[in-house]
Amino acid sequence: MPTTTSSFLYTGTLRKVTIPPGATSLTVHLWGGAGGGGGSDRNSGGAGASGHYVTASNISLTAGQEIQVTVGGGGEGGSSGGSAPGGTNGKSRTQYSGGTGGNSGPSGSSGAGGGGGGATVIFINGAEAVVAGGGGGGGGGGLNSAGAVGINANSATARSPGTLGENGAGHSGDGGAGGAGGGGADGGTGGSGATADNGGTGGRSGSDNAAGGTADAGSGVTPGGTGVQYYTSGVAVGGSAGQSGGNGKAVLLFNIEVNAKYKVSGVWKDISDIKYKVLGAWKDITAAYYKVGGTWKALYNSGVNFTETAAGFGDSTGNTTSGSTGSTPAPPPSGGGADHPYVGPEPDSRVICTWLTRNGLMSEEDLLIDNIYSVKHVSESTKIGYWFWAVPYVRFMDNQHRKDTKFSRYLVRFSKALAQSRTNEIKREMGYVHDHDYLGKTTRFIGENLCTALGFVLKPFIKQRYTRWLEETDPRKMDW
């Protein structure tokens, strides 16, 4: 049985053909568009998920039906900066496109989310027949952690239309945005913006309609079906940080039962076209039949000839995101910091982290994170022991700092190094970063144990001095 192969890469158009006589069945190999990578901050954006691969055989055809094929585009990579735009969506047949990545936060510089990939879709006579889902976009990176990768698996959007991928959620402060969902038989959900200046989460890929065949969601940035003879390098590959995902591809193999030939000098030749003349002009005969047992059989057709149109292609953006907008936690009501949440006007109320922040040597975000941890997890004895020596130490450091001597500069650098390292290790314990800070780990082990012992011994004698501060740091009174 002769086979006619039609192969298509992404062009931003919809292709269609009327099924010719004698075309009885169809085999397809489809790759969806991949997700774009998230934009980067100090940490990189997450990579986009690969486009899905679907293959199906023996799809029944009837002459006169119309086939429409749309190849999905790869999602664009997210940008970097303040209010950086998310990657544009990978487009496909209308309502099968991916979503647009979320914008990064307006404060500082962070990564925007990657766009979701468009699905590669085949419709037969107006009905969805086969779909290879588009990949999810990667989350934007933040100062403290990388963006999460786009997710190869699908979580179906509850938005309408259900085939359109969701947009990624943005960020309202300083932090990475969420990646977008891919288009598919079920569009994928969009990722969420980060909490604080961290990386956003990745979007989910669109789902597949394999029409009784098989589907492969791929792994990470690598699509399924790379060993198939019809695969082209770069197709459906997930985008790295800030880069666009690979476009999809469609290969259609039509099984044709007609084969008219004629003999020349003993050699059979294929009949490629038949014409007839009308008023001196030759016209094409597109098909020929013969009757067997009262049933007409196709003898000849003029081939499978697709046309292109932009009508019915593309979506300006995806569905409204179901991800949550990222935000930076509000500062403590008292305006204080991790080491001493109450910072009043009196000079002896200041402690190390608060002093460093006031002098531009520690970020307000780190101060807040340290504060939340101290309120929730540091014991009363440890706090009292710390305040006992830290308040006079900060007064001394402040006096030296005003003199701007060589000794004062070394003193401030030393204090900053220990305080920042301790905060870095606390951030790791709270899940904001992944890597240990071993200086901070040592500082916490030695310093916190010494403060606990000192506070335990002195608490009966000096607790009254810190009553106000203890009330301010009572976890029962803090609403985080």
Image (tube, grey):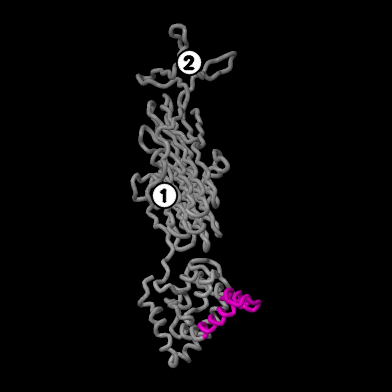
- The residue carrying pointer 1 sits among few (fewer than 14), some (14 to 19) or many (20 or more) residues within 10 Å by Cα, namely many
In the rendered structure, which segment of residues is drawn in magenta? 389-418
Q: Secondary structure at mark 1?
A: loop
In percent of width and height, residue 379 lies at 44, 82
| Rendered position, 76 above or below 431 | above
Amino acid beneath label 1: Asn
Q: Main secondary structure of the magenta part?
A: helix
Disc marking residue 167: 1
Q: Position of residue 405 (x, y in %)?
A: 64, 77
Question: Which quadrant of the figure has residue 267?
Answer: top right
Is residue 208 highlighted in magenta?
Answer: no
**Residue beneath disc 2:** 274
Q: Can you tell which mark lies on residue 23?
A: none
Q: Is 405 a magenta residue? A: yes
Whichever of callouts 2 and 1 sits on the residue coming sooner in the sequence is 1
Label 2, label 1: how many angstroms apart (C-alpha)?
Answer: 52 Å
Q: Residue 47: in sight, yes or no?
A: no
Furthest residue toward front = 403
Secondary structure under tag 2 reads strand
Which residue reaches farthest bottom?
A: 461
**Could you say which quadrant of the image residue 44 lies in?**
bottom right
Identify the image quadrant of residue 235: top right
